Amino acid sequence: MLLRINGSTTRTACQASSPKQPPTGSNSSSDSNEAEPAYAYSDPVNQFLGQFLPSNRAAKDELAGIDFDAPKLSGRSIQQMAELVEAGLSRSQWFVTGEVDPRLFSDSFAFKDESVATTGIKAYATGVRKLFDQATSKVELISVEARPDTQALVVVWRLEGRVNLPFKPKIKPYVVTTTLGLDPDSGLICSQLDEFSVPGWDLLLSILLGEGFGAKPAPPVEELRAAAVAAAAAGGSKAAANVLKSASQK
């Protein structure tokens, strides 16, 4: 059973946390009538490395079984959405597989992390599928938190695996805090912000130079879950988040 908290934090509006629309053609091709996903990179290094990932077409083919036009699950309570997200991530690990449940996402969905931004759940799913080696990458859930006052879900998880570059570099295990903003009218996920327990430059250099560079890898997920439960019992969700961040850097 995962830690589940109803905490409070600064208000996170979907509109405020949604990245700007990536410019058309920022990283796209036109091999079909369907618009290709566009990704706006924050730095030239990640943009350069992105050229060596598998093609959009290959990723789309692997996700062909997903019905992106499925009817939306609008009108769910925030607690129901938390349960659906936890169940979906436990089943398909869509943060690394791209095997999303489109019924949970608004048509205006937008994603952002330190390296890249995109809009649309299909573009997000395609980008995730391209990025991670499916044989080794995995999502290990630590906690799922419903925050009614900010209309958001906060998912804390441990990531490890390999990146789909030609030499399949290993990802140093680290903790990700994912904030899913919910549309106040439909209750659907309309934004996703990923924040890492170590700086993006540290992760990039450890991928290129090896795991021994920079911060230490995150501890096993069992240790992180235990730390989160203990901290939440003692001091609430903010204390749990701080413990997770410090534990992942030891």
Image (spheres, rainbow, N blue to C red):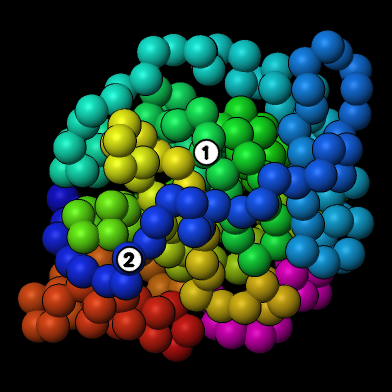
Q: Is residue 173 above or below residue 81?
A: below
At horizontal 47% and vertical 63% (from top left) the residue drawn is: 176
Residue type at tag 1: Phe
At horizontal 76% and vertical 75% (from top left) the residue drawn is: 205
Where is residue 29? Give x, y as percent: 90, 29
The crowd level at tag 2 (other Cα within 10 Å; few <14, some 14-19, many 20+) is: few
Could you tell me which secondary element the residue under label 2 belongs to? loop
Q: Is residue 63 left or right of residue 153?
A: right
The reply to whether discs 1 and 2 touch (Cβ–Cβ < 8 Å) is no
Does residue 224 appear in the picture of this structure? no
Q: Nearer the viewer, residue 58 or 121?
A: 121
At horizontal 61% and vertical 28% (from top left) the residue drawn is: 122
| Quarter assignment of residue 103 | top left
Does residue 101 appear in the picture of this structure? yes
Q: Is residue 172 left or right of residue 146?
A: right
Residue type at tag 2: Arg
Q: Is residue 92 left or right of residue 167?
A: left
Q: Is residue 184 above or below residue 12?
A: above
Q: Is residue 238 above or below residue 96?
A: below
At horizontal 32% and vertical 66% (from top left) the residue drawn is: 11
Where is residue 84? Give x, y as percent: 26, 34
Residue identified by numbered label 2: 11
Q: What is the span of residues highlighted in magenta in the rendered image?
A: 204-217
Q: Nearer the viewer, residue 219 or 50?
A: 50
Q: Is residue 197 left or right of residue 75?
A: right
Could you tell me which secondary element the residue under label 1 belongs to? strand
- The residues bearing labels 1 and 2 have C-alpha atoms spaced at a distance of 18 Å
Where is residue 217? Give x, y as percent: 53, 75
Residue identified by numbered label 1: 109
